Amino acid sequence: MYPYILFFHSIWRWFVLVSLLYSVFRGFQGWRRGDAFSKADDTLRHMTATVVHIQLILGLLIYSISPLIRYFWSNYHEAVHERDIRFFGMEHSLMMLVSVIIITVGSMLAKRKENDRDKFKTMAIWYSIGLLIILLNIPWPFSPLVSRPWFRMF
């Protein structure tokens, strides 16, 4: 079952990135142009937060059953000095959780704003911060910190 969860997680992360990129684009566009915050924009705001929450659930599931994470916690004093293991055991997990919290707060604040321009502005700013944190903590193939392939084959 673990390989299937990893596979779904590795595919779903692209939905997260695409939905966040489009939401940030739409947020800045609507803010700059003074567009009306339509039902489609509200659905985009909500669906982006939902996609991020599904990724959080998948990530927590992987975190709870991962052999790498089990090693990290059972050998903490040694593992914390190993860059790859520390990244996945502590840094990646914590920063992704922070980004989910930021995106969730941004979604809630945008929903509660009175005028359309403030809704777009709130969505653009909070989602951009969440996206930036995510982009900085993804194990990209070119990352000097730790790397993983674009798509993992099992």
Image: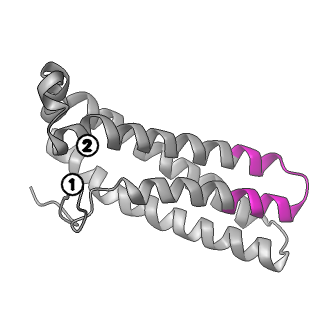
**Dots 1 and 2: beta carbons under 8 Å?**
yes
Residue 139 image point, x, y percent: 27, 56
Vertical side of 120 occupied by 106: above or below: above
**Residue on which the image places disc 2:** 87
Q: Amino acid at mark 1?
A: Val
Q: Residue furthest left?
A: 154
- Look at the image and tell me in which quarter the N terminus lies: top left
Residue at 20%, 58% (x, y): give it: 147
Q: Residue furthest bottom?
A: 33
**Residue on which the image places disc 1:** 146
Judged from the image, the secondary structure of the residue bearing numbered disc 2 is helix
Judged from the image, the secondary structure of the residue bearing numbered disc 1 is loop
User: 120 and 47: which one is in front?
Assistant: 120
Q: Main secondary structure of the magenta part?
A: helix
User: 33 and 38: which one is in front?
Assistant: 33
Q: Is residue 16 visible?
A: yes
Residue at 30%, 59% (x, y): give it: 11
Q: Amino acid at mark 2?
A: Phe
Residue 102 image point, x, y percent: 59, 45
Q: Earlier in the sequence, mark 1 or mark 2?
A: 2
Label 2 crowding class (10 Å Cα cut-off): few <14, some 14-19, many 20+? some
123 left or right of 32 in image: left
33 left or right of 46 in image: right
Does the segment drawn in magenta span residue 102? no
What's the distance in space between the residues labelled 1 and 2, CA to CA?
7 Å
Q: Residue furthest top?
A: 74
Q: What's drawn in magenta, residue-wise?
A: 108-124
